[in-house]
Amino acid sequence: MQADRSLRIVLAEDSVLLREGLAGLLRRFGHTVVARVGDAPALVAAVQEHDPDIVVTDVRMPPGFSDEGLRAAVTLRAAHPALPVLVLSQYVEQTYAAELLDTDPRHGRGAGVGYLLKDRVGEVEEFVDAVQRVAAGGTVIDPEVVRQLLGRRRDPIDRLTPREREVLALMAEGWSNAAIARTLVVTEAAVAKHIGSILTKLDLPRPRTTTAASGRCSPISAPSCSNPADGAASATCRRQGAPGARPPRRSTPGPSTQCPCGAATRER
């Protein structure tokens, strides 16, 4: 299978043997490898220097061997939306793969993108054909890559344990950490740990944790001024310039009240 046209290719692969083998293979099919590099900075520099028809890159490259090659590809596509990129890797790096594969022309992102897994390329011709199709503006994605990316988009609530769902439901109703702990018969430290796990699993930013000594209520706690340490609420409120007192506890759900320091509270 000879190429319809000779492509100018930048090849990025940290393994010397694989890099040289791929370069020889592409030349055998009539293409020109204008640059062979082994790390992400060199990949970016080679694209700027040679303006290739397509980039073929690995994901894990020096110095961190995590996702440097894929991040470089995303950066290059942002700077050159029409640049075809084919990722050839052993891994599906989900964090940046979805961004790389986003080819909506309405947002300035052209087609010409692919993601193949090295161990699943069964024929030399299959790989070369993928290179040519991507360079021509096509999309070539291994079905396993699609499966993993779709799996990542499941309902995020499915990631939570039954106990974490209980904590989340009570948080949504405005319960304090202390009230949640009493209801679930666990410690407040356990509740705080569950909240941290919930934020992580739902990909939510962790708020800054502050203590009574900072003069503000802790954002991670449910919205109550109460603190496991006796007198912490009063000390907090006094720092806000108001006579502080721990909000009265109710045996049944009651309306929200406003602590003098400004935090809405509701005890169960």
Image (cartoon, helix red, strand yellow):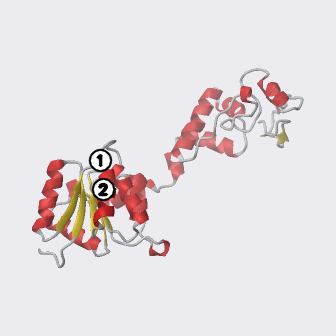
For the question of whether residue 236 can be seen, the reply is yes
View extreme (top): residue: 230
Residue 153 appears at what percent x and percent y?
46, 57
Disc nearer the start of the sequence (1/2): 2
Residue 205 appears at what percent x and percent y?
58, 45
Report crowding for label 1: few under 14, some 14 to 19, many 20 or more residues within 10 A (C-alpha).
many
In the drawing, does residue 203 fall left or right of residue 151? right
Image quarter where the C terminus lies is top right
Disc 1, SS? loop
Question: How many labels, in total?
Answer: 2
Image quarter where the N terminus lies is bottom left
> Which three-letter amino acid code belongs to the residue tagged 1?
Met
In the drawing, does residue 196 fall left or right of residue 145? right
- The residue identified by callout 1 is 61
Residue 100 appears at what percent x and percent y?
39, 61
The reply to whether dot 1 and dot 2 touch (C-beta < 8 Å) is yes
How many angstroms separate mark 1 from mark 2 (CA)? 11 Å
In front: label 1 or label 2: 2
Which residue occupies 84% across, 40% down?
Answer: 258
For the question of whether residue 59 can be seen, the reply is no
> Which three-letter amino acid code belongs to the residue tagged 2?
Leu
In the drawing, does residue 146 fall left or right of residue 152? left
- The residue identified by callout 2 is 43
Taking depth in this image into account, of 243 and 185 the one nearest to the observer is 243
Which residue occupies 33% across, 62% down?
Answer: 48
Is 119 drawn above or below residue 237 in the view shown? below
Quadrant of the rendered image containing residue 119? bottom left
